[in-house]
Amino acid sequence: MNQINEEYIEDYIRSLLPSSNGILKDLEKYALDYHVPIVQPEVAQLLKVLLKIKKPNSILEIGTAIGYSAIIMAENTSPNCKITSIERRRDMVEKAIENIGKTPFKDRITILEGEAEEVLLNLNDKYDFIFLDAAKGQYMEFFNRCINLLDRDGIIVSDNVLYKGMVATDKLVVRRKKTIVKRLRKYLQYINEIQGYTSCVIPIGDGLAITYKEE
Ligand code: SAH
Ligand code: MG
Protein backbone atom coordinates (compact mmCIF):
# COMPACT_ATOMS: atom_id res chain seq x y z
CA MET A 1 0.00 0.00 0.00
CA ASN A 2 1.26 3.48 -0.79
CA GLN A 3 -0.60 5.17 2.10
CA ILE A 4 -2.72 7.15 -0.35
CA ASN A 5 -5.02 4.51 -1.73
CA GLU A 6 -5.82 0.99 -0.67
CA GLU A 7 -3.81 -1.41 -2.77
CA TYR A 8 -6.91 -2.98 -4.28
CA ILE A 9 -8.06 0.41 -5.60
CA GLU A 10 -4.69 1.18 -7.16
CA ASP A 11 -4.37 -2.31 -8.62
CA TYR A 12 -7.85 -2.12 -10.05
CA ILE A 13 -7.33 1.31 -11.64
CA ARG A 14 -4.02 0.12 -13.10
CA SER A 15 -5.62 -3.02 -14.47
CA LEU A 16 -7.84 -0.80 -16.63
CA LEU A 17 -4.95 1.02 -18.26
CA PRO A 18 -3.52 -0.10 -21.58
CA SER A 19 0.10 -1.19 -21.10
CA SER A 20 2.84 0.86 -22.71
CA ASN A 21 5.03 -0.29 -25.52
CA GLY A 22 8.12 0.83 -27.40
CA ILE A 23 10.37 3.35 -25.76
CA LEU A 24 7.96 4.13 -22.91
CA LYS A 25 8.00 0.50 -21.87
CA ASP A 26 11.82 0.48 -21.98
CA LEU A 27 11.94 3.64 -19.86
CA GLU A 28 9.54 2.15 -17.31
CA LYS A 29 11.90 -0.79 -16.91
CA TYR A 30 14.92 1.49 -16.68
CA ALA A 31 13.18 3.62 -14.04
CA LEU A 32 12.35 0.55 -12.01
CA ASP A 33 15.88 -0.85 -12.25
CA TYR A 34 17.60 2.45 -11.45
CA HIS A 35 15.02 3.92 -9.05
CA VAL A 36 14.11 6.92 -11.17
CA PRO A 37 10.82 8.40 -9.88
CA ILE A 38 8.81 8.69 -13.10
CA VAL A 39 5.08 9.48 -13.07
CA GLN A 40 2.92 6.58 -11.99
CA PRO A 41 0.63 4.99 -14.59
CA GLU A 42 -2.61 6.52 -13.30
CA VAL A 43 -0.95 9.94 -13.11
CA ALA A 44 0.34 9.56 -16.68
CA GLN A 45 -3.21 8.71 -17.71
CA LEU A 46 -4.65 11.80 -16.04
CA LEU A 47 -1.98 13.92 -17.74
CA LYS A 48 -2.99 12.47 -21.11
CA VAL A 49 -6.66 13.28 -20.54
CA LEU A 50 -5.86 16.81 -19.31
CA LEU A 51 -3.65 17.44 -22.33
CA LYS A 52 -6.29 16.21 -24.74
CA ILE A 53 -8.85 18.53 -23.15
CA LYS A 54 -6.56 21.54 -22.79
CA LYS A 55 -4.70 21.20 -26.12
CA PRO A 56 -1.73 23.31 -25.01
CA ASN A 57 0.59 25.09 -27.43
CA SER A 58 3.45 25.41 -25.05
CA ILE A 59 4.34 23.22 -22.06
CA LEU A 60 6.85 23.81 -19.30
CA GLU A 61 8.05 20.90 -17.18
CA ILE A 62 10.18 21.18 -14.04
CA GLY A 63 11.98 17.88 -13.44
CA THR A 64 12.83 16.00 -16.65
CA ALA A 65 14.64 12.97 -15.20
CA ILE A 66 15.00 10.50 -18.12
CA GLY A 67 12.42 12.26 -20.31
CA TYR A 68 9.58 9.82 -19.69
CA SER A 69 6.84 12.34 -18.86
CA ALA A 70 8.11 14.74 -21.53
CA ILE A 71 7.69 12.01 -24.17
CA ILE A 72 4.19 11.22 -22.87
CA MET A 73 3.26 14.89 -23.08
CA ALA A 74 4.61 15.14 -26.62
CA GLU A 75 2.66 12.06 -27.65
CA ASN A 76 -0.58 13.53 -26.38
CA THR A 77 -0.37 17.02 -27.84
CA SER A 78 -0.45 18.45 -31.33
CA PRO A 79 2.69 18.54 -33.52
CA ASN A 80 2.76 22.34 -32.96
CA CYS A 81 3.06 22.03 -29.21
CA LYS A 82 6.53 22.81 -27.86
CA ILE A 83 7.79 21.38 -24.58
CA THR A 84 10.51 22.93 -22.45
CA SER A 85 11.78 20.83 -19.56
CA ILE A 86 14.20 21.80 -16.79
CA GLU A 87 16.58 19.37 -15.10
CA ARG A 88 19.52 20.03 -12.79
CA ARG A 89 21.34 16.72 -13.04
CA ARG A 90 23.75 16.46 -15.94
CA ASP A 91 23.49 12.64 -16.09
CA MET A 92 19.69 12.88 -16.32
CA VAL A 93 19.86 15.58 -19.00
CA GLU A 94 22.13 13.36 -21.09
CA LYS A 95 19.90 10.33 -20.61
CA ALA A 96 16.80 12.35 -21.48
CA ILE A 97 18.37 13.73 -24.66
CA GLU A 98 19.39 10.22 -25.65
CA ASN A 99 15.88 8.87 -25.00
CA ILE A 100 14.06 11.73 -26.71
CA GLY A 101 16.43 11.30 -29.66
CA LYS A 102 14.85 7.88 -30.25
CA THR A 103 11.38 9.40 -30.64
CA PRO A 104 9.82 11.55 -33.37
CA PHE A 105 9.64 14.42 -30.83
CA LYS A 106 13.22 15.66 -30.65
CA ASP A 107 12.37 18.92 -32.41
CA ARG A 108 9.52 19.63 -30.02
CA ILE A 109 11.24 19.02 -26.69
CA THR A 110 13.95 21.34 -25.36
CA ILE A 111 15.81 20.48 -22.19
CA LEU A 112 17.34 23.23 -20.11
CA GLU A 113 20.00 22.18 -17.67
CA GLY A 114 20.18 23.96 -14.32
CA GLU A 115 18.50 24.66 -11.02
CA ALA A 116 14.88 25.37 -11.83
CA GLU A 117 14.70 28.35 -9.47
CA GLU A 118 17.43 30.02 -11.56
CA VAL A 119 16.43 28.80 -15.00
CA LEU A 120 12.86 30.02 -14.43
CA LEU A 121 14.12 33.59 -13.96
CA ASN A 122 15.59 33.53 -17.48
CA LEU A 123 12.43 32.38 -19.23
CA ASN A 124 10.29 34.95 -20.96
CA ASP A 125 7.96 32.86 -23.05
CA LYS A 126 4.43 32.10 -21.96
CA TYR A 127 3.15 28.60 -21.30
CA ASP A 128 -0.37 27.25 -21.08
CA PHE A 129 0.43 24.00 -19.25
CA ILE A 130 3.06 23.56 -16.53
CA PHE A 131 4.03 20.27 -14.93
CA LEU A 132 5.79 20.62 -11.59
CA ASP A 133 7.65 17.42 -10.72
CA ALA A 134 10.91 18.30 -8.92
CA ALA A 135 12.15 19.14 -5.41
CA LYS A 136 8.97 19.12 -3.34
CA GLY A 137 10.34 21.51 -0.73
CA GLN A 138 10.53 24.21 -3.39
CA TYR A 139 7.06 23.98 -4.92
CA MET A 140 5.95 27.31 -3.47
CA GLU A 141 8.93 29.05 -5.00
CA PHE A 142 8.50 27.27 -8.35
CA PHE A 143 4.79 28.08 -8.36
CA ASN A 144 5.33 31.78 -7.72
CA ARG A 145 7.84 32.00 -10.53
CA CYS A 146 5.70 29.89 -12.84
CA ILE A 147 2.49 31.89 -12.50
CA ASN A 148 4.17 34.82 -14.22
CA LEU A 149 4.91 32.56 -17.17
CA LEU A 150 1.45 31.02 -17.23
CA ASP A 151 -1.21 32.21 -19.68
CA ARG A 152 -4.73 33.03 -18.65
CA ASP A 153 -6.73 29.75 -18.61
CA GLY A 154 -3.43 27.96 -18.04
CA ILE A 155 -3.00 24.89 -15.88
CA ILE A 156 -0.34 23.88 -13.38
CA VAL A 157 -0.18 20.22 -12.40
CA SER A 158 1.93 19.49 -9.30
CA ASP A 159 3.03 15.91 -8.66
CA ASN A 160 3.78 14.15 -5.35
CA VAL A 161 1.88 16.68 -3.24
CA LEU A 162 0.62 14.11 -0.71
CA TYR A 163 4.10 12.63 -0.38
CA LYS A 164 3.40 9.07 0.72
CA GLY A 165 0.41 10.26 2.70
CA MET A 166 2.64 12.18 5.12
CA VAL A 167 1.15 15.51 4.07
CA ALA A 168 -2.30 14.39 5.21
CA THR A 169 -1.40 13.06 8.66
CA ASP A 170 1.37 13.48 11.22
CA LYS A 171 1.04 9.79 11.98
CA LEU A 172 3.00 8.94 8.82
CA VAL A 173 5.63 11.67 8.98
CA VAL A 174 9.18 10.47 9.40
CA ARG A 175 11.49 12.88 11.11
CA ARG A 176 13.86 13.72 8.29
CA LYS A 177 10.94 14.60 6.02
CA LYS A 178 9.32 17.04 8.46
CA THR A 179 10.42 20.18 6.64
CA ILE A 180 9.32 18.98 3.22
CA VAL A 181 5.96 17.91 4.62
CA LYS A 182 5.45 21.28 6.31
CA ARG A 183 6.28 23.05 3.06
CA LEU A 184 3.94 20.87 1.02
CA ARG A 185 1.10 21.55 3.47
CA LYS A 186 1.71 25.28 3.15
CA TYR A 187 1.84 24.91 -0.61
CA LEU A 188 -1.48 23.08 -0.83
CA GLN A 189 -3.12 25.62 1.45
CA TYR A 190 -1.68 28.43 -0.63
CA ILE A 191 -2.81 27.15 -4.03
CA ASN A 192 -6.27 26.51 -2.61
CA GLU A 193 -6.59 30.06 -1.24
CA ILE A 194 -4.80 32.27 -3.75
CA GLN A 195 -7.06 34.73 -5.54
CA GLY A 196 -7.56 34.18 -9.26
CA TYR A 197 -6.84 30.46 -9.21
CA THR A 198 -8.90 27.33 -8.65
CA SER A 199 -7.14 24.22 -7.38
CA CYS A 200 -7.96 20.67 -6.44
CA VAL A 201 -6.02 17.79 -4.91
CA ILE A 202 -6.44 14.32 -6.35
CA PRO A 203 -5.40 11.26 -4.33
CA ILE A 204 -3.87 9.16 -7.11
CA GLY A 205 -0.23 8.15 -7.46
CA ASP A 206 1.67 10.12 -4.82
CA GLY A 207 -0.97 12.85 -4.79
CA LEU A 208 -1.56 15.37 -7.53
CA ALA A 209 -2.73 18.99 -7.49
CA ILE A 210 -4.27 20.76 -10.45
CA THR A 211 -4.43 24.54 -10.51
CA TYR A 212 -6.37 26.59 -13.06
CA LYS A 213 -5.47 30.23 -13.65
CA GLU A 214 -8.56 32.37 -14.15
CA GLU A 215 -6.89 35.47 -15.58
N1 SAH B 1 8.93 14.20 -14.64
C1 SAH B 1 9.75 13.01 -14.67
C2 SAH B 1 10.29 12.64 -13.31
C3 SAH B 1 11.03 13.74 -12.62
S1 SAH B 1 11.86 13.15 -11.16
C4 SAH B 1 8.90 11.85 -15.20
O1 SAH B 1 7.79 11.67 -14.68
O2 SAH B 1 9.34 11.15 -16.09
C5 SAH B 1 12.39 14.68 -10.51
C6 SAH B 1 13.59 15.29 -11.23
O3 SAH B 1 13.67 16.66 -10.84
C7 SAH B 1 14.92 14.65 -10.85
O4 SAH B 1 15.56 14.19 -12.02
C8 SAH B 1 15.71 15.78 -10.19
O5 SAH B 1 17.08 15.78 -10.52
C9 SAH B 1 15.02 17.02 -10.74
N2 SAH B 1 15.08 18.19 -9.85
C10 SAH B 1 14.81 18.22 -8.53
N3 SAH B 1 14.91 19.46 -8.07
C11 SAH B 1 15.26 20.26 -9.09
C12 SAH B 1 15.54 21.65 -9.23
N4 SAH B 1 15.49 22.48 -8.19
N5 SAH B 1 15.87 22.12 -10.45
C13 SAH B 1 15.95 21.28 -11.52
N6 SAH B 1 15.68 19.97 -11.45
C14 SAH B 1 15.36 19.46 -10.26
MG1 MG C 1 6.70 12.80 -9.54
Image (spheres, helix red, strand yellow):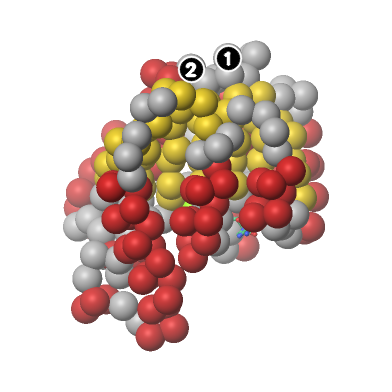
Report the side of 192 relative to 117 (left or right).
Answer: left
Location of the N terminus (image quadrant): bottom left
Residue positioned 46% across, 24% down in the render: 152
Residue 78 bears which disc, if any? 1
| Mark 2 vs ligand 1: CB below 8 Å | no
Q: Where is residue 39 in the image (x, y as percent from the top left)?
A: 48, 47
Q: Position of residue 134 (x, y in %)?
A: 55, 55
How crowded pointer 2 is (Cα within 10 Å; few <14, some 14-19, many 20+) is rated as some
Report the side of 7 relative to 35 (left or right).
Answer: left
The relative height of residue 58 versus residue 165 in the rendered view (above or below) is above
Q: Position of residue 131 (x, y in %)?
A: 51, 40
- Between label 1 and label 2, give the one nearer the viewer: 2
List the residue tagged with mark 2: 55
Residue 123 vs residue 41, the one in the foreground:
123
Residue positioned 53% across, 56% down in the render: 141
The furthest residue to the bottom: 175
Residue 72 vs residue 133, the one in the foreground:
133
Is there any visible trace of residue 171 in the rendered image? yes
How crowded pointer 1 is (Cα within 10 Å; few <14, some 14-19, many 20+) is rated as some
* Secondary element at image label 1: loop
* Secondary element at image label 2: loop
Q: Which amino acid does label 2 sit on?
A: Lys
Quadrant position of ligand 1: bottom right
Tag 1 near tag 2, CB within 8 Å: yes
Q: Which callout, 1 or 2, points at the residue further toward the start of the chain? A: 2
Residue positioned 49% across, 48% down in the render: 143
Residue 159 vs residue 25, the one in the foreground:
159
Residue positioned 37% across, 70% down in the render: 181
